Amino acid sequence: MIGDLGARDATALAELVAAGEVTPTELLDAALAAVEARNPAINAVVLVQEEVARRAIASGLPQGPFRGVPFLLKDLGCEAVDFPSHNGSRLLADTRYDRDSAIYARMRATGVVTFGRTTSPEGGIGAATESAVYGGPTRNPWNTEHTSGGSSGGAGAAVAAGIVAMAHGSDGGGSVRIPASSCGLFGFKPTRARLPDGPYVGEGWAGMAIDGFLTRSVRDTAVMLDACAGPDLGAPYVAPALSRSHSDAITRPPRRLRVMICDTTFTGAPIPPEVKAAVHQAGRLLEGLGHHVEPGRPAADVPMMMRAWTDIVGVGTALGVRRALKGRDPAGLVEGVSRGAMAHAETLHPTRYLEAVGEIHAFGRQMAAVFGERAGDGPDVILSATLAEPPATVGRFSHETEDYVGYRIGPGGIFEYSPFCAVFNASGQPAASLPLGWSGGDLPIGVHLAARFGADEELIALCAELERAAPWAAIRAPMAGAARS
């Protein structure tokens, strides 16, 4: 029997299986034991399907790069016949699917042993994971008084707690990178349309949403991205082709890059000293590696983008909720912030949605101009914090409020807390959170890197170079059967 799954990354676990040192069944048993021991304190893993996982092992797993490695799906999207979903909502509890999504089929082909789902806020619109359908908030394994982030908060908590070495997530405004920052993990948002959305979804939030993964190592993300990349049948658009692959890119350092370091928000607001210090520390690390680092701030209309994002997601939430309600009263079925999103959508002029999409695309052009048309015209990478603060306390971003607009863009709202991530969902550019900082030695602080549109390989190569220079592999699971608090 293998011990803590937080002691190795998924690649290392797959190597043990391939060498015959451990069996997929033993790994699954270890993951299920960790769920039993650790999940009550953090509330991250739900809808466990043990028999489905055991049948998959018995029938013969695909000979993929993660053969035999336990795996969890986010409980939002990633539709799969064998894995019913609550989608973070009482309204959608126990939803079942008649065919697998393209992204799940590609993940399954890697040989992972999927055995359940991880918590998500209703509609995926929060920076914390506290959906009522799960009976309580999801908590940060490093300190259970704090959130693990959102919307892939269950995935982040499960990986950080050592329940699994890698988990599926998705990112429409930072929902992979926020939990990565909060939980001391690596989170990478690919270029828009790098991964498939279908067949259940044409595009997510006007192209701003995309799947991703919460991992302990850059190599795990690189391998899984390679396994899943490429459009599915009928995709409305595709990402620029990779030169080779993410896995190939991380085998060598990137060229020496020009890095814009921003130690404020992108609108110039200050960030706390401990977060600012983490950004500067990362800047010094990059300089020591030979990259050119100089201060700056991207010239783009971030407030416009945030308003447009809020309207697009509000309309999308209203559409999804009304379709599922089928005329029923939302009270008791739909959480306050979602009801607020529905009410906000009703106030918008019928043409506002397309206007907001146009503003998002205009913003993408502004951000592209920051980087320049070609290498050398501007920075190759923008370095900032991932979040403007250390992980928030549980309850701060409760979904009970019906003030959807205030929840997003009001004083103390999510965009003040997370002012960096959604910028690159709107622009479609690749971005990553790296676990390079700490708040008083207690909670992780993520550092954020973003690159020009389509430059996924260069960005992930830089992430791998930083991982080699300042290994975060020593960040083990913070729980040993009980959470810290």
Image (spheres, rainbow, N blue to C red):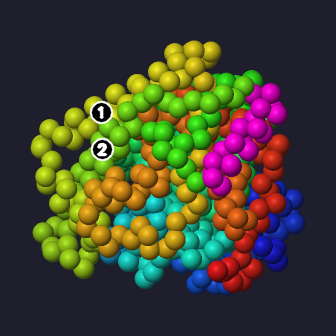
Q: Which residues are magenta?
A: 273-291
Identity of the residue drawn at 43% across and 52% down: 416
Q: Which mark is residue 397?
A: none
* Residue 20 magenta: no
Asked if residue 286 lies in the magenta stretch, the reply is yes
Amino acid under disc 2: Arg
Q: Which residue is mark 2?
A: 307
Of helix, strand and loop, which one carries label 2? helix
Whether residue 460 sits left or right of residue 252 in the image: it is left
Q: Main secondary structure of the magenta part?
A: helix
Spot occupied by residue 141 in the image (x, y as percentages of width and height): 64, 73
Residue beneath disc 1: 359
x and y, in percent, of residue 395 in the image: 44, 74
Residue placed most toward the observer, 189 or 484 = 484
Left or right, residue 343 beside residue 120: left
What quarter of the picture does the N terminus occupy? Answer: bottom right
Label 2 neighbour load within 10 Å: few <14, some 14-19, many 20+: some
What residue is drawn where x is 15% and y is 74%?
329
Left/right placement of residue 182 relative to residue 233 reads right
Above-or-below relation of 322 to 380: below
Whether tag 1 and tag 2 are in contact, CB under 8 A, the answer is: yes
Mark 1 lies on a secondary structure that is: helix
Image quarter (top left, top right, bottom left or bottom right) of the C terminus: bottom right
Where on the picture, by quarter, is residue 353?
Answer: top left
Q: Residue at x 78, y 39 (%)?
A: 285
**Viewer-nearest residue: 236 or 422:** 422
Q: Position of residue 421 (x, y in %)?
A: 49, 46
Residue 298 x, y percent position in the rendering: 50, 30
Marked residue nearer the N-terminal end (1 or 2): 2
